[in-house]
Amino acid sequence: MKSVLLIGMGQFGQLLGEKLVNMGDEVMIVDKDEHIINAIAPKYTNAVIANCMNADNLKTMDIPSYDVCVVTIADDFQSSLEITSVLKDLGAKYVVSKANTEIQRKFLFRIGADEVIYPNRDIAEKLAVRINAQKVYDYIELDSEHAVFELAVPNKWIGKTIREANPRAQYQLNILTIKKGNKIMPAPTPDTAFEEGDKMVVFGNTEQIIAFTNKKR
């Protein structure tokens, strides 16, 4: 369980807040719009109506006590920038800020954000990968060259073991897990056999994996 300070309760902030609460986190929400706060406050550990551009308001929130502070203000980048900076000055352990452009992302890092999320870019990248790859169920980028993919097992591998298919030598694929229906095999062995309907979670070079998925299956 994490203690989270969530600043900015627009659409993205509300979706994030709901997910965090559902995962058991203690979430304090802050927004300057009293109508938004009054409407959603019962769902959260605590809720405050405040303009966080005022550093004095932030000082009253015991910033160092939170595991994570998240700034999701989307319509006023100057506010996001200043709030991120003040949070770090007040001793925030870890600050995550939301950016809408690459330039915003760079500035947020420069003034101290520990992590910057860029939803529009992330969604675009995932969609581009899924358009260009066959039977990709999920995709997590680790850096500019490597990623983790959830893929359908190729038809020609059905009935073969991992040793026989030899994905690492043949395609530079490192199999992390195999999903058999609702069951996950966290540590498949070389003798684990692929079955109809299996999915595999693999790690490797993004371009190589996409090329692999586009081969005749």
Image (spheres, rainbow, N blue to C red):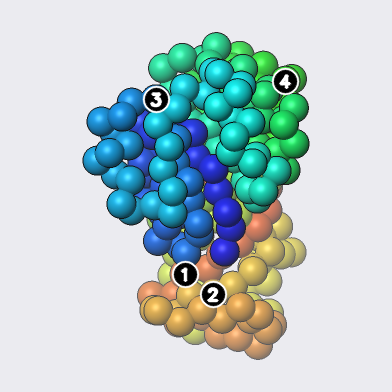
Say which amino acid is labelled 1: Lys
- The amino acid on which the numbered mark 4 sits, given as a three-letter code, is Ile
Marks 2/1 in contact by CB < 8 Å: the verdict is yes
Residue 38, image x, y percentages: 27, 39
Say which label, 3 or 1, has the lower sequence index: 3
Of residues 160 and 147, the one drawn nearer to the viewer in this rendering: 147
Assign a secondary structure to mark 2. strand
Q: Tag 1: Cα neighbours inside 10 Å, few (<14), some, or many (≥20)?
A: many
**Relative side of 158 to 12, left or right:** right
Q: Could you tell me which residue is drawn at 61 percent across and 78 percent down?
A: 186
Q: Which mark is residue 111?
A: 4
Q: Residue 39 placed where, x, y %?
A: 24, 40
Amino acid type, mark 3: Lys
Q: Which residue is mark 2?
A: 178
| Mark 4 or 1, nearer chain start | 4
In the picture of the structure, the residue carrying the numbered disc 3 is 32
Query: Which tag is nearer the camera, tag 4 or tag 3?
Result: 3
Q: Earlier in the sequence, mark 4 or mark 3?
A: 3
Residue at x 47%, y 64% (from the top left corner): 24
Left or right: where does residue 190 sit relative to residue 193? right
Badge 4: few (under 14), some or many (20 or more) residues near its Cα, within 10 Å? some
Indicate which label's residue lies in the foreground, 2 or 3: 3
Q: Quadrant of residue 115?
A: top right
Which of disc 1 and disc 2 is earlier in sequence? 2
Give the distance between the C-alpha atoms of the residues marked 2 and 4, in whole angstroms: 42 Å
Separation (CA) of disc 2 from disc 1:
6 Å
Q: Is residue 170 left or right of residue 35?
A: right
Query: Which residue is disc 1 drawn over?
Result: 199
Answer above or below: position of 198 versus 23: below
Tag in front: 3 or 1 = 3
Seen in the picture, residue 205 relative to 165 is either above or below; the reply is above
